Amino acid sequence: MSSAVDTPTPVEYRPALASIVETVIAPAAAETDRTGAYPRAAMDALGAAGLLGLLSSPEVGGGGGSIADVAEVVETISTACGSTAMVVLMHYAAVSVVEAHGPVEVRSAISRGQHVSSLAFSESGSRSHFWAPMSSATPEGDGVRLDATKSWITSAGQADSYVWSSRPLTAEGPMTLWLVPSDSTGLRTAAPFDGLGLRGNASRPVVAEGVIVPATALLGADGAGLDIALGTALPVFLVGNAAFSLGLMEAMVGEAATHLTSTRLEHLDSTLAEQPANRGEFARLRTRTDEVRAFLADTLAALASGRPDATLRVLQVKAVAAEAASEVADGVMRLCGGAAFRKDIGVERSFRDSLAARVMAPTTAALRDFVGRATLGQPLFGDAR
C-alpha cells in the first residue's frame, strides 16, 4: 500500500475522489469485470488520497467521517465500477468495528491508507443468517484457535485483515468477533469467483483450519459480537449497500438518457427521446431512481438526528434500493434495446452487478422479515439471541 498520507476531512475528499474515479477506476472497470482482477490500483490510489481512512478517528490521523460520507463515496465509485465500490464498502463496514474495538496500530495503518479490511460473516452452515455463525473459537495455549468455512469474503486473499465471526469462546451469546490477519497460517481461499456480477471484488470462500490468533485479537467482549455487528457494522453495510445500488442506477439511467437523445429514427426524422412511449418509460426509471435517493437521504437524516424510526429505516434501505436497482436495470436494458447488450457501453455490466445486492446477506427476504418483526413488535432475531 501507499506511504503515509494526510487524510482529508469529509469536506475535502470530493476532488480527490472525482479524480480517482475518472482517471483510475472508470478506465479499468470493463477490464476488471472481464478478467475478474482485483482493483488493486484503485485501492492504492484511494489509500494514497486518504479515502480508506475516511471513518478513522482524527486521533489516529483519520478523516472522522460519517455514514453519510460513506454513502457518498460508495455511490460515486459505483457509478463507474460496482466491484470497486463493493470492495470499498466492505472495507468501511469492517473499519467501523476495528475503529471501535481494534488495536491502535491497525487503526493508524488504516488511517494512513496502508491497511484494507473486510467482513467475514457469511458461512456455509448458516448461509445468509450471519447472526448464527457455525464456526468455532477454542482456547489453545496462550491464543485462540479458529475453525470455519466462510462462504463469501469480499477481498478474500487481498485485504490485510478480516473482521471474523465465530461462536463465543466461553461466554453466553450468539457471536464473537475477531480481527484476523489475512495471511494467518491455516487460512485457505477457494478458486477465484467466475460468475454473473461483481466479478472484480475477489469475493470467494475462505476456510480456516486451526488458525491461531492471540487472545488480544478479540474485538469487543466475548459473546457481544451480534450487538457490535448490529450497532456498528450493519448500519454502515446496509446504508452503503443502498448507495452502491443507487450509483448503479444513476449510471444506467444516465446511459439510457444518452442513448435516447443520440439515437435517431431516420424514417421519422426524430430521436428515440422524442417518442412518447420512450419518454414515459425513461421518466418512470428516472423517478424510481429519485425515489431511492429520497429514501436514502431520509435514512441518513434519521440516523443523524436520532429519530425513533432510524433503525427501521436502516433495515429498509438496502431492500428498497436493491429491488429498485433490479427493476431499473431491467427497464434500462429493455429501453435501450440491443445497444444495452454491448459490453463497451457498460449497461449490461451494471445490470449484472445490480442483481448482487438482493442476495447479499442480509438478503431482501431476510430484511423484509426483520422489518415485519420490528413493526409488529416481535423480537428481531427470534431465538438467535
Image: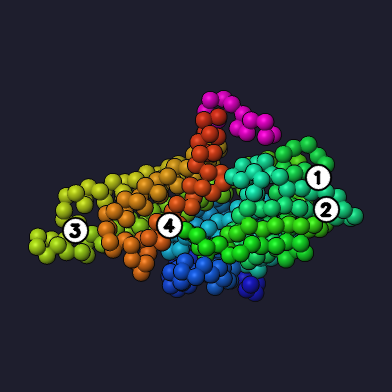
Q: Tell me whether the residue at label 2 lies in contact with that at label 1, contact meaning CB atoms closer than 8 angstroms.
A: yes
Q: Quick one: SS at disc 1? A: loop
Dot 2 corresponds to which residue? 144
> Around disc 2, counting alpha carbons within 10 Å, would you say few (fewer than 14), some (14 to 19), or many (20 or more)?
many
Q: Tell me whether the residue at label 1 lies in contact with that at label 3, contact meaning CB atoms closer than 8 angstroms.
A: no
Dot 4 corresponds to which residue? 352
Q: Nearer the viewer, mark 2 or mark 4?
A: 4
Indicate which disc, 1 or 3, sits on the residue closer to the N terminus.
Answer: 1
Name the residue type under label 3. Answer: Leu
Name the residue type under label 4. Answer: Arg
Residue 84, horizontal then vertical, whole percent = 51, 63
Question: On screen, 138 above or below 104?
Answer: above
Indicate which disc, 2 or 4, sits on the residue closer to the N terminus.
Answer: 2
Indicate which disc, 2 or 3, sits on the residue closer to the N terminus.
Answer: 2
Q: Quick one: SS at disc 2? A: strand
- In three-dimensional space, the C-alpha distance between marks 2 and 4, rounded to whole angstroms, equals 40 Å
The disc placed on residue 169 is 1
Q: Which is nearer the eye, 251 or 204?
A: 204
The disc placed on residue 85 is none
Q: Is residue 2 visible?
A: yes
Which residue is depicted at the point 33% across and 66% down? 342
Question: On screen, 106 above or below 317?
Answer: below
Main SS of the magenta part reads loop
The quadrant the C terminus occupies is top right
Q: Is residue 19 visible?
A: no
Q: Quadrant of residue 337?
A: bottom left
Question: What is the span of residues highlighted in magenta in the rendered image?
Answer: 374-385
